[in-house]
Amino acid sequence: MRIIKGKVINGHIEIEDETLEEGSWVTVLVADESTFTLTDQEEAALLDSLAEANRGELLDAKDVLRRLP
């Protein structure tokens, strides 16, 4: 999984510096006023976390809940 930034131009999503295979399925998250913006460091941390999850490096929900104060 990758995060790719793009912009809608004339009703189509235009992305820069990235090539997707024809027929690729994508999920689009539309940013609006109630969403957030990530810094470059936050985006890198998110991508690292996604990579960990894709490798199966996950925490059980019970372990996460036990860590909460």
Image (cartoon, rainbow, N blue to C red):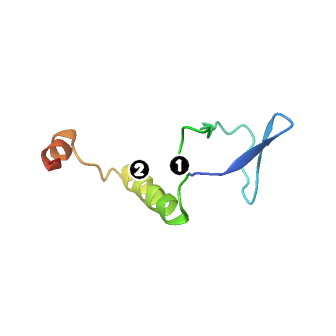
Percent across and percent down for residue 40 are 55, 64
At a point 30% along the width and 53% down the height, the residue shown is 57
Name the residue nearer the viewer: 6 or 48.
Answer: 6
At a point 74% along the width and 60% down the height, the residue shown is 17
At a point 73% along the width and 53% down the height, the residue shown is 19
Disc 2 target residue:
54
Quarter of the image for residue 62 reads top left
Percent across and percent down for residue 25 are 64, 36
Percent across and percent down for residue 55 are 37, 53
At a point 72% along the width and 37% down the height, the residue shown is 23
Distance from the alpha carbon under mark 1 to that under mark 2: 8 Å
* Vertical placement of residue 46 versus 13, above or below: below
Name the residue nearer the viewer: 9 or 37.
Answer: 37
First along the sequence among labels 1 and 2: 1
Q: Is residue 22 left or right of residue 52?
A: right
Residues at discs 1 and 2 in contact (Cβ within 8 Å): yes
Disc 1 target residue:
1
Residue projecting furthest to the bottom: 41
